[in-house]
């Protein structure tokens, strides 16, 4: 398990750095302490619970799968995959309506 935590910590640190995010900022966004983030990244923490992983994944805009398994998908990509799957189940007329609705939503300032 120690190996797993070092891999997870490495993924967290790598993603954080790629986003130009400090440990302090990640801690704030994930509602954890900077010390917790540092300990997880260095794998000096003995354990890292699933709720902690979920908070960090959300703050880093990745799925928990990425942190745990290395399969990279941002939350936006997950949404796009869901939209694509839904669109494939529709006929062309429904697709046109969906596109119009998406464009309408994108133009709204108050949603």
Image: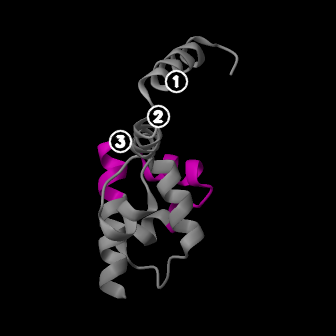
Magenta stretch, residue numbers = 13-36
Decide which of tag 2 and tag 3 comes sooner along the chain: 3
Q: Is residue 106 above or below residue 59?
A: above
Front: mark 1 or 2? 2
Residue on which disc 1 sits = 98
Estimate the x, y position of residue 59 in percent, counting from the top left: 51, 49
Estimate the x, y position of residue 109 in percent, counting from the top left: 64, 13
Q: Is residue 50 above or below residue 70?
A: below
Q: Secondary structure at mark 2?
A: loop
Q: Label 1 vs label 2: CA separation?
A: 9 Å
Estimate the x, y position of residue 61 in percent, counting from the top left: 45, 46
Q: Secondary structure at mark 1?
A: helix
**Quadrant location of the N terminus in the rendered image:** bottom left
Decide which of tag 1 and tag 2 comes sooner along the chain: 2
Q: Label 2 vs label 3: CA separation?
A: 36 Å
Corner quadrant of residue 10: bottom left
Tell me the chief SS of the magenta region: helix
């Amino acid at each position: 398990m120690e190996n797993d935590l070092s891999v997870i910590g490495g993924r967290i640190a790598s993603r954080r750095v790629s986003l130009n995010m400090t440990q302090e900022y990640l801690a704030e966004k994930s509602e954890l302490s900077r010390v917790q983030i540092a300990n997880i990244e260095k794998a000096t923490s003995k354990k890292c619970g699933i709720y902690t992983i979920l908070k960090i994944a959300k703050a880093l805009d990745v799925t928990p799968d990425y942190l745990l398994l290395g399969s990279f998908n941002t939350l936006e990509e997950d949404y796009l995959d869901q939209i694509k799957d839904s669109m494939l189940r529709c006929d062309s007329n429904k697709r046109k309506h969906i596109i119009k609705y998406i464009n309408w939503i994108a133009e709204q300032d108050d949603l």
